[in-house]
Image: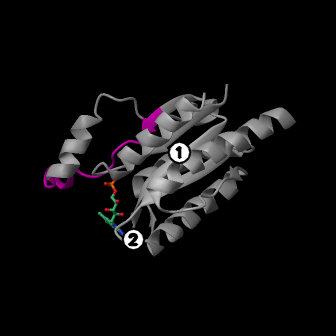
Amino acid sequence: MTRLAVVYYSSKGTIDTLARRCADTAERLGAEVRLRHVHELAPLQAINADERWRAHVEATADEPPATVDDVLWADAVLLGTPTRFGNLAGQLMAFLESLGPQWREGLLAHKVYAGFTASASGPSQECTLLSLYTTIHHFGGVVVTPSSLEHELGLDELTERVLAVAHALEDAA
Ligand SMILES: Cc1cc2nc3c(=O)[nH]c(=O)nc-3n(C[C@H](O)[C@H](O)[C@H](O)COP(=O)(O)O)c2cc1C
């Protein structure tokens, strides 16, 4: 059974909704799934000043946060982040940077990775995903790209393609 980790950051719930959809789709397709949000790093003052942000932090407080082991465990990793000034969120980047020792040991290579994002406008999403791919290239991972950035159409297909590539790699090994 292919093991898929959906590792994401969301402040106000948009990416959270997309991450759950990926997880549901992957389970429906027979994968073993871990759905994991990364640690919030923003100051409490900023979170509490925004009702949607505060509500989302509270809603996910009891769910397990992403750990290094979740990435090591997975055959495939789907990474979700809101677009932040045309880039990925610092919270997700901080998590990826925490994987330095595992990268050095070559433990992140040969896994399948893909990214998904959301933004207020379309073009920024491509910048965000390209930034994410830079890190995945550094890991030595296999990148699967979405065929559409329209999430209602693209997310299920992206999840399916990630699992198909992971299957193919398992068969080839
Ligand atoms: C600090 C900050 C920077 C953002 N930068 C961009 C941007 O460059 N382009 C864009 O279209 N949307 C931008 N947005 C909008 C978010 O990407 C968008 O609202 C996202 O869907 C929020 O996801 P979430 O609900 O999971 O937190 C930004 C939002 C914030 C708070």
Can you give x and y, in whole percent of width and height, for residue 19 in the image? 44, 43
Farthest-out residue, right? 172
Q: Is residue 47 magenta?
A: yes
The amino acid marked with disc number 2 is Phe
In the rendered view, tell whether residue 67 sits above or below residue 115.
above
Query: Label 1: which residue?
Result: 98
Q: Residue at x 59, y 58 (%)?
A: 146
The amino acid marked with disc number 1 is Ser
State the SS at label 2.
Answer: loop
Give the mark nearer the N terminus: 1 vs 2.
2
In the rendered view, tell whether residue 17 sits above or below residue 24.
below
State the SS at label 1.
Answer: loop
Q: Residue at x 19, y 46 (%)?
A: 54
Disc assigned to residue 149: none
User: Over which residues does the magenta segment extend?
Assistant: 35-50
Ligand 1 contact, mark 2 (Cβ < 8 Å): yes
Real-space Cα distance between discs 1 and 2? Answer: 22 Å
Quadrant placement of the N terminus: top right
**Which quadrant of the view contains residue 110?**
top right
In the rendered view, tell whether residue 68 sits above or below residue 149.
above
Q: Would residue 157 be found to the left or right of residue 83 on screen? A: right
Q: Residue at x 55, y 35 (%)?
A: 26
Farthest-out residue, front? 153
Mark 1 against mark 2, which lies toward the viewer? 2
Query: Label 2: which residue?
Result: 85
Q: Residue at x 41, y 63 (%)?
A: 83
